[in-house]
Image (spheres, coloured by chain):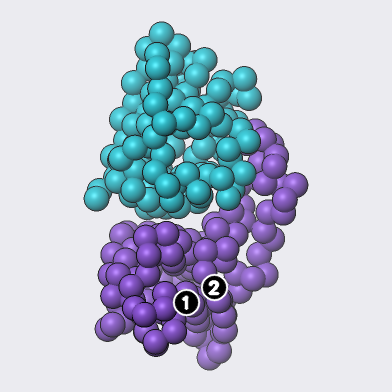
Amino acid sequence: MAFSCEVEVAAGVAKITLQGELDASVAGQFKSAVEQAAAERPQKLVLFLRELEFMASAGLRVLIFAKQKMGADVAIHVVGASGPVLRTLEMSGFHHSVYISDTFEG
Amino acid sequence: MEPLSLPATLDALGEIGRYVKSAAAAAGLDRDAAYSLRLAVDELATNIITHGYEEAGISGHITVAAACSPQALRVTLEDRGRAFDPRQARMPDEADLARPLEERQVGGLGIFLALRGVDGFEYSSEGGVNRSILTVRRPAGS
């Protein structure tokens, strides 16, 4: 499935929804979405990954970029990641730095 | 399966992914093993295209070939870019992986995930041809 990425920022919360397959050829789109969200100076970044079927390390690098760009005090939430995507986050130690949940309220 | 040869640009990744997924399905790999293999091939192909070709100012092709034996599925990547043995890369250690994201270095994660996701990995570079071979054991009875 083709990759798509949507950004929405409201009330200090940036929401990015990722769908399809995130490899190095499309990671730039995700990075642009993070830059767009960062410009609004959100207090929280929420990534909706339920429809994300594949994520390579290029996607992980954008998460590192997001944390470094937005600042350590901006919490990153990862919502609805599927089994293999979640496993990649855990193998890479990212579960120490982001909040992982199945659903997001608020 | 017939080898697949594509111009070495990042646009090749999608087609390489589909090729590996169908090879994994034909070999009877379960969902997790199939995903790990696809991720491993994607990471190594990304490195070959980015570092072996684009950053080196070389253009050429990348070839992926799958071969199945009763015991294992073997995926071979071949290229004629700048040689690089992924096993020589600096990979994150436990301390790096525990570090908060704001202190992370970006390099090394892809190869780390690739090599962790397969049962065997071999690399050679001879006569200008670089070859990475990834092996995944097949489940008994498939």
The purple chain is: B
Q: Is residue A71 left or right of residue A79?
A: right
Percent from the top left, x then y, of residue B35?
40, 60
In this view, the residue in front, B71 or B125, is: B71
Percent from the top left, x then y, of residue B99?
70, 39
The cyan chain is: A
First reached walking from the N terminus: tag 2 or tag 1: 2
**CB atoms of marks 2 and 1 within 8 Å:** yes
Badge 2 crowding class, 10 Å Cα cut-off, few under 14, some 14 to 19, many 20 or more, is: few
Q: Residue at x 41, y 31 (%)?
A: A102
User: Is the C terminus of chain B in the top left, top right, bottom left or bottom right quadrant?
Assistant: bottom left
In this view, the residue in front, A82 or A49, is: A82
Q: Is residue B99 shown above or below B18?
A: above
Q: Residue at x 55, y 89 (%)?
A: B126
Which residue is identified by label 2?
B119
Percent from the top left, x then y, of residue B140?
41, 78
The amino acid at mark 2 is Asp
- Do the dots labelled 2 and 1 sit on one chain? yes
Find numbered disc 2 in the image and state the secondary structure of the residue it sits on.
Answer: loop
